[in-house]
Every structure is written in structure tokens, then in C-alpha cells.
Amino acid sequence: MEHVTGLRCVICHSVYTPDPALYVCPHHGQEGILDVEYDYDRIQHKLGGVAAKRPLSTHWQEKGMFAYRPFLPVAHNTPSPPLLVGATPLYPAPRLAKQANVAHVWVKDDGRNPTASFKDRASALALMKAREAHADIITTASTGNAAAALAGLAASTGQKTVIFVPATAPAAKIAQLLVYGATVLLVEGTYDDAFDLCLAASESFGWYCRNTAYNPYMAEGKKTVIYELYDQLLAQNAWPPTHIVVSVGDGCIISGVHKGLRDLKAIGLLSEMPRLIGVQAAGSAYLYEAWQRNEDVLTKPPIAASTVADSISAGLPRDRVKAITAVRQTNGAFVRVSDEEILAAIPTLAQGSGVFAEPAAAATWAGLQRAVADGLIQPDARVVLLVTGNGLKDVKAAMSAVGKAISVPADLTAVHNALAGLLL
Ligand SMILES: *Cc1c(COP(=O)(O)O)cnc(C)c1O
Ligand SMILES: [Zn+2]
């Protein structure tokens, strides 16, 4: 890991030597999230040099996120899990662009990952770091997707997991955990309660902890989406986009996206940073509020979070320091969308692009429309929507956003009658 120079506390900026038992800054506890720092000359050397207009990788379709291993904080001999993580499609969506009144929209469909969410990128790295730490058990708290991702990746290598999820998590996500053979604890409480319980358990039992933001390596897995985006947009002669729209709960995805962009800037493949647009649900808008009111996220108290978009429900976003920095440093913005707008976005995104998203992921489409309406995004913008989770994760929410199907007896005349005035 000679390309990793240290782990820097986001609060006091102290730099620490990587150690499997070191998750957060000893002086700042859970707020003292660590950011992995690199020697970019070494990364460039490992990449065999980089040049503008040249792809970073020519085999990302087969290797997914591990095509970009020189950027990952893992030892050279740590095996990667066998599942294909990343290598997700990027679809141009001209009809959505027209609807939103911007020049270009691309949909990055990360719901195509092995467990159907973006979280696979982080959990794949968790598996590798746990292996380096010789851990018997990996644990995590999650609103559902991070847990499903960990359980799935762990199943691919035979690793044991213990998972803490709120008892209210959507059934599909709980089903994934059980199918993959995780030991599942349904916590009678919120995600925030599950998070604290998981931390206490991991300390008490010596388990490797994947908790989002607390574990410094999760954003490093998430950042890989940016290298793929680079290779995909470069192939269309469209790098870089002007805006990337990301839904935000704990804020780890937007921090990871920012990290990937900073990496590319450091090696000379990005001159102008895309603006990061963080989308929050109105019922879970901690970061939106803090950004609007210019509040200090280290002193702002938790809020009571409640939204249909379970994956972005977070009363105290764990990665709030990095997330607000990502938006501020890229001259981006936070926007807030209602549950009604999020639900309505599921069918409009699907019908405008063919991509079926879970509520938290469809929120990006609602967020783009809001950002355009608020004048935050101009008509010449070239926008990437990061779709972070597949719609089949939460069928109940999707069904509440669409009309009823037409019931007919098995009879052609009935079909004729039912469609009269509709299609015929
Ligand atoms: C986790 C998740 C998010 C939000 O990511 P954070 O790092 O918590 O901000 C968004 N969408 C989906 C589908 C997720 O699973
Ligand atoms: Zn510190």
C-alpha cells in the first residue's frame, strides 16, 4: 500500500498510518472521519502513465471497479471478490434532457450491480479490507442496501456477516440478506439506532465494521463510479459533465464521487470540476438545511428523519462533513424534494429512459427538475444522474406511484372494449 500516504482526519487534519483497527480519528471519535490520502505520482506510475483523451482502463467492462485498482487503498496481493461490481451502463437520455430543459442527460445505472445497488462498490472494498485485517466476521448497520451488498459480496467469498437493519426496511432488502445467509438483526428503531448498536457490537465482539462513513474505505470504493464515468464519457467525447446529481442520506456517495473527481484532477484528467447537486428528501433534509443556512454540521443537532425513500433517510448524516465540503468545493448545491415528487419520479424516469429506480435513486430525477426550476442548472448543462438502486428493491413504493393495470376476462372482445378509446 505504498501509494497510500495516510488517513487524514476531516476535523483536525492529523494524518495517521493505516491500521485495520483504526476507523476514526482517536481525538474526534465518530465525527473524526478519515480521508485516505495518496501519492499520485505512484498511482500514475502504476497506471503506466496517463494522458488526456486516453482511457484510464480498456477492460473496465470485464473487471468493473477493479480495473481501477491502482486508485484503491488495498495491498497488491489482496484478492478482489469474484462478483462483477461496477461496469454499469451509462445511457444518454435525450427525452429526459428535453423534459428537464437541459442540453444532455445521462443515466448511470448503478442498480445494475450484483445486489442491485451502488453500495456494492463500497462493500466489495469492505470484503478486501476485512481480509487484510484477518477478520472472522464483518458487520454493518444499514437502511438495507449496504447490508444487502455486504451480504452478497460476503456470500461470494464465504465470509460470515452480522447485519443490523431497522425492522422497517423494505421486504426485498431483508429477503436479500436472508437469502445470502447473513445473520440478520432487525432493530426496533431507526437506522441511527441500528448504526450505534452495530458500532457497540463490533467494538465488544471485535468484528470488522463496514458502517458507512465510520469505515474510512467505503468512500474509496464508491469513488470508482467516477473513473467509469470518465472512460464512458471520454468514449463519447463528452468528458467532463457540468453537473452530477446524487441523492444524499449519510453523504458517503457524494463524498466518494467528490473523491473520484479529486483523484482525476490530481492526475491531470480533469480541469473543471463538475458541480455536485445533492438531492435530499424533504423529510430527511439535514444537509440541505445546513447548506442553506450555512450551519456548522459539527454542532447542528440531529433531525427526526422520515421519508418514503428509505435509503436516504438519515437523521444525522454520518458523512456530513465530507458531503457538505463536496458541494461547497464544487460550487454545487443541495436541493430538497418531497415524497410525492420522489414517487412521481419513479415512472417518469423509467418511461423517459428505461431505467427503473428505487425511490432514493429516482429522487435524482426529481432533484434535477427542482434544480432547473430554481435556476441552479442552466439550459446548456450536461448532466449525469446517478441512479443508485434498482426499482425492484421497493415494489410497494413503485406501485403507489402508478395507476392500476386493466383487468379483463380471457376474451378478445373484452380486450377490444377495454382498449377502445385508449389505443384503438
Ligand atoms: C445509500 C443510498 C443512497 C445514499 O447514499 P449516502 O452515502 O447514504 O448518502 C442513495 N441511494 C441509494 C439507492 C442508496 O442505497
Ligand atoms: Zn481529528
Image (tube, grey):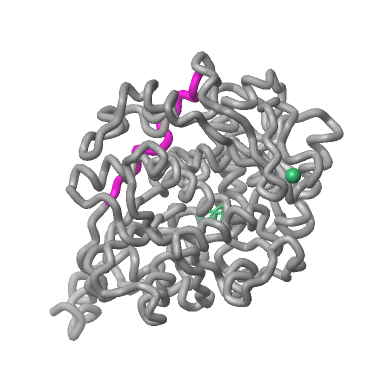
Percent position of residue 236, x then y:
18, 48
In the image, the segment drawn in magenta is: 79-90
Which quadrant holds residue 317?
bottom right
Q: As displayed, is residue 44 above or below residue 262?
A: above
Residue 53 in view: yes
Q: As displayed, is residue 2 above or below residue 252?
A: above
Front residue of 69/17: it is 17
Residue 162 in view: no
Q: Quadrant of the C terminus?
A: bottom left
Front residue of 122/115: it is 122
Front residue of 3/88: it is 3
Residue at position x 36%, y 40% from top?
A: 227
Ligand number 1: quarter of image: bottom right
Residue pushed farthest left? Answer: 424
Residue pushed farthest right? Answer: 204
Residue 59 shown left or right of residue 301 in the figure: left
Q: Quadrant of the N terminus?
A: top right
